[in-house]
Image: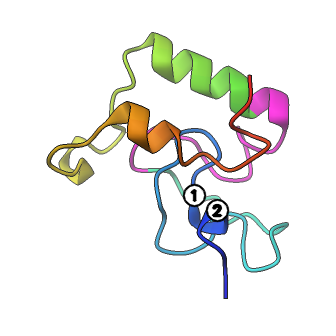
């Protein structure tokens, strides 16, 4: 069973319905995060890539890739606190 951090986007921390990097943590789904728009296995495949994608997303104002999926009362700061280690640093 995947842990909570295994279900989180490495860029923005949004909880996914299945592990974005697969049950083994090494097999990306190549799905797109509804929140930040990262493609799992592409832009988030390295620590540098995660940090650069996050910085660019935040610079744009952290828009939702699929705005209709944004939950009521969403908090960018609370969600970013859920980014798995070591991707949360930097």
What residue appears at the point 56 percent right and 59 percent down from the top-left corner? 31
Give coordinates of residue 58: x percent, y percent. Answer: 48, 19
Say which mark, if any, is on residue 67.
Answer: none
What residue appears at the point 30 percent right and 45 percent down from the top-left corner? 66
Examine the residues drawn in magenta and state their main secondary structure: loop
Q: Quadrant of the C terminus?
A: top right
Task: Classify mark 1: helix, strand or loop.
Answer: loop
Give coordinates of residue 39: x percent, y percent. Answer: 60, 47
Give coordinates of residue 4: x percent, y percent. Answer: 59, 69
Front residue of 46/83: it is 83
Q: CA distance from mark 2 to mark 1?
A: 5 Å
Give coordinates of residue 67: x percent, y percent. Answer: 23, 41
How is the rendered protein coloured? Answer: rainbow
> Horizontally, is 89 left or right of 38 in the view?
right
Q: Which residue carries the number 1 mark?
A: 8
Q: Which residue carries the number 2 mark?
A: 5
Q: Which residues are magenta?
A: 34-49
What residue appears at the point 74 percent right and 40 percent down from the top-left corner? 87
Assess whether residue 36 is covered by the magenta stretch: yes
Q: Mark 2 near mark 1, Cβ–Cβ under 8 Å?
A: yes
Vertical relation: 63 (above or below) 71: above
């Amino acid at each position: 069973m995947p842990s909570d951090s295994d279900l989180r986007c490495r860029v923005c921390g949004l909880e996914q319905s299945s592990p974005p990097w697969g049950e083994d943590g090494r097999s990306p789904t190549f799905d797109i995060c509804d929140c930040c728009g990262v493609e799992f296995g592409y832009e988030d495949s390295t620590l540098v890539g995660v940090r650069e994608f996050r910085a660019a997303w935040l610079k744009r104002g952290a828009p939702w890739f699929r705005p209709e999926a944004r939950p009521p009362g969403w908090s960018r700061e609370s969600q970013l606190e859920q980014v798995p280690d070591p991707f949360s640093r930097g």
